[in-house]
Amino acid sequence: MTELVVDNPYTLEPAVRIELASQDEVGRTLDRATQAAKAWRKSSLSDRKNLCLRVIELMERDAKVIVEDITRMMGKPLRQAVSEVAGMGKRARHMVNIAEIALADDVLPTLEGLERRIVREPLGVVFNLPAWNYPLLTAVNVVVPAVLCGNAVVLKHSPRSPLCGEHFARAFKEAGAPADLVQALHCDHATSEKIAGDPRVNFVAFTGSVLGGRRIYAAAATQHFVDVGLELGGKDPAYVAADADPEKAADSLVDGACYNAGQSCCGIERVYVHESLYSKFIERAVEQLRAYQLGDPTKESTTLGPLAQPNQPAFLEAQVRQAKSAGARVLLGGASRKIEGRGRFFEPTLLVDVNPDLDVVRIESFGPVLPVMSVRSDEEALALMNDSDLGLTAAIYTRDRDRASRLARDLETGTVYMNQCDTLDPGLPWTGTKNTGKGSSLSRLGFLHLTRPKSLNFKL
């Protein structure tokens, strides 16, 4: 057996040890999921809804253990992990509440002697690969809607946060789900790719890097034409227009850049500020960035935890180093550090005088690094915001709704915010453009790819 060892990003000591599944175990897992899906598709929507509500109640009951596991596996401060449990419950309950409408038959107008309707059928087995940065949220986006649709789920969580997969599987079992309806599976990347292409899998949902998404997408097409949902990277921009409040914008955008240590797909990674507000914005941003408290993520006083992945501090330092060599100025931060000799932290960093060709502007940083540029007009800001091969979210700070609406029509992103950022409403589809991926989760549209349409054309 091969063992997965996850280190604690703060203590740097082993935090979790889990044996990876053998090929035989993978096969048995998929066989059990197939049988569970065949039985569960016959269940009523009412039973599915009640099951999912019980699961969320159980996970909320066990929140203390789950929160502590998240913090020791990926370094998220406890207070932020607590918020993630609350967000998971909100998303799940929303999907339960809209399931009846979202999955209802689409009945066409009556024609003489004909009944015509479109029904939604379960797919079968959903293979879900969530990400470590929001290990509950990226999982629940798929698990609960998939079960509500009548599918079984094989949950292969990130190797950085494997225990979260176990928590979901355990909660479904304790809630009285049929055997093997939701199973946690631990395996390496190569095995995940094989599973994606296995004919027993009927849908693949992947949240992670662009490279990982390409590999999963290619693997899924090897044996059959299974569909794949991909939620990949973001290099999310923000524009502070001439009529915005620069201090409020700075407060919001610094939080959007540094929350979860900047390890958010929809975190703010580049800001364009109208030249008339630039100096005021920078002054406030420096003040806000200096206020962060780096340290032990289990302490209430810590507001910025360590980076989850071992290679990330060096990656961020390389981005900053390249920017400095090209003339950018580091007003704050710019280096990795330890706190009392512990952890892999990166200082909250503010870069100015950056140019659009730098890696820190073009390649996802996934850390608390904020490059800020001055622009002269809405048109210049729009062009720079769209100058990316990623398109998850974009934020516009303005007092003018018409300005926001006009820019939103031309922004090449899945979500456009006005006067906010780095947030998510489960009533709206979570989707992206370009290399950010394909498909949608959440909202009523989040059910569509987890079912297949069937036409009923009855002559009466």
Image (tube, helix red, strand yellow):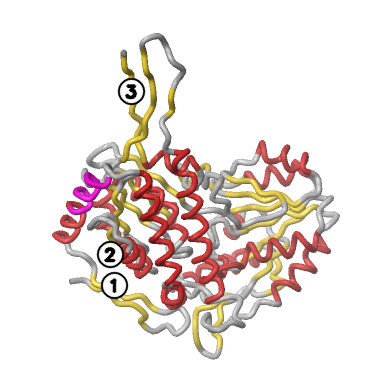
- Residue position for label 1: 4
Against 365, is 238 above or below?
Answer: above
Q: Mark 1 and mark 2 in contact (Cβ < 8 Å)?
A: yes
Residue under pointer 3: 456
Quarter of the picture containing the N terminus is bottom left
The amino acid type of the residue labelled 1 equals Leu
In front: label 3 or label 1: 3
Give the mark, 3 or 2, whose residue is nearer the N terminus. Answer: 2
Provide the residue span drawn in magenta. Answer: 32-40
Image quadrant containing the C terminus: top left
Please tell me in which quadrant of the rendered image residue 171 appears: bottom left
Rounded to the nearest whole Å, what is the CA distance between mark 3 and mark 1? 49 Å
Q: Is residue 9 above or below residue 448?
A: below
Q: Which residue is drawn at 65% across and 75% down?
A: 333
* Numbered mark located on residue 252 in the image: none
Three-letter amino acid code at the position of disc 2: His
